[in-house]
Every structure is written in structure tokens, then in C-alpha cells.
Image (cartoon, rainbow, N blue to C red):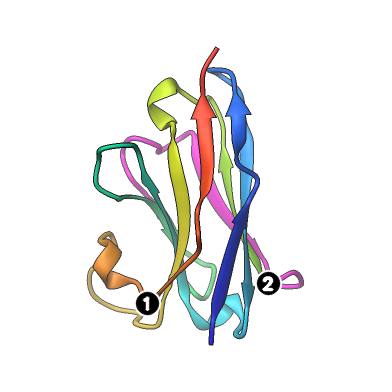
């Protein structure tokens, strides 16, 4: 059974940075396409970005492109979401997710098989 555990959330001022971590256990990160989603209060869970199981490709939502980046450390079996130039509208619970499929749509929550419990990010002065 795959388990995903996020960490690194917190309160940050606008323009600041945070790095979220998603520790994977039960399988290796190279077995899955990994993604980050976020959900603000009263809103649906939305796609932030993903990294392919090979690590060769990343893709981001337009709202975070150029500010967020996804990376991974195979030695730690961990995926990261580096968030820079944070804005108040980035405030949300952030979730990492893993999918076994390697083709097809990848930007919907239903496309993913495993989820972490989430970590809260608040961007406020």
C-alpha cells in the first residue's frame, strides 16, 4: 500500500517562498506520476503541477507557471513543490497525489490513485 505524507506548510508573507515535501512509502516515486493539487475553502480541488515517473517532464497550471516547480529526490523517495513569489490567492490546503497510469488526462483529481492528507499554506501579511 502506497502512503503519501506532506509536510512544509505554514504561514508566509506575500512574495515569500515555501517548499512542500511529499514523502512516499510502500513504493518508489519512480513507479508513479506524481502531482500536486490544492484546495481553497469553498472551492474544488485544483491541479497545480505534476512530474512524470521518469522525472524528465513537468507540467504546471497557468496560475503557478514560473513561480512553482516540482522536483524529486530518489534517495529520499520524496517529491517537492517549491513555491516562490507567493500570493494571497495561493492560500489553500496542498495535496500530493500519485497515479499508476502513465497516459491520458492527468489534471483531474479522479486521475490519481493515492493521496496524502494535505498541508495548509497561508499567504498573508
Magenta stretch in the rendered image: 58-77
Residue under the image location 35 percent in, 38 percent down: 40
Within-10-Å neighbours for mark 2: few <14, some 14–19, many 20+: some
As drawn, the label of residue 55 is none
Residue marked by disc 1: 113
Q: Is residue 92 above or below residue 35?
A: above
Residue under the image location 49 percent in, 34 percent down: 67
Q: Is residue 68 left or right of residue 108?
A: right
Inspect this view and state whether residue 79 appears.
yes
Looking at the image, do the residues carrying marks 1 and 2 touch, with CB atoms under 8 Å apart? Answer: no
As drawn, the label of residue 77 is 2
Within-10-Å neighbours for mark 1: few <14, some 14–19, many 20+: few
Q: Position of residue 34 (x, y in %)?
A: 47, 67
Element type at marker 1? loop
Inspect this view and state whether residue 58 appears.
no
Residue under the image location 60 percent in, 64 percent down: 5
Answer with the quarter of the image where residue 2 lies. Answer: bottom right
Q: Position of residue 112 (x, y in %)?
A: 34, 72
Quadrant that contains the C terminus? top right
Disc 1 from disc 2: Cα separation: 18 Å
Q: Is residue 93 magenta?
A: no
Residue under the image location 23 percent in, 68 percent down: 105
Work out whether residue 74 or residue 123 is closer to the camera in this orientation and state it.
Answer: 123
Q: Is residue 88 above or below residue 6?
A: above
Amino acid at each position: 500500500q502506497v502512503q503519501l505524507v506532506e509536510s512544509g506548510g505554514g504561514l508566509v508573507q506575500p512574495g515569500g517562498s515555501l517548499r512542500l515535501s511529499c514523502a512516499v512509502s510502500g513504493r518508489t516515486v519512480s513507479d508513479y506520476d506524481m502531482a500536486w493539487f490544492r484546495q481553497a475553502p469553498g472551492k474544488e480541488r485544483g491541479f497545480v503541477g505534476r512530474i512524470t515517473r521518469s522525472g524528465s517532464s513537468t507540467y504546471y497550471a497557468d496560475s503557478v507557471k514560473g513561480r512553482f516547480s516540482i522536483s524529486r529526490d530518489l534517495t529520499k523517495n520524496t517529491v517537492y513543490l517549491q513555491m516562490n513569489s507567493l500570493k494571497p490567492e495561493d492560500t489553500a490546503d496542498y495535496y500530493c497525489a500519485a497515479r499508476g497510469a502513465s497516459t491520458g488526462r492527468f489534471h483531474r483529481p479522479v486521475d490519481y490513485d493515492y493521496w496524502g492528507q494535505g498541508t495548509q499554506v497561508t499567504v498573508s501579511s
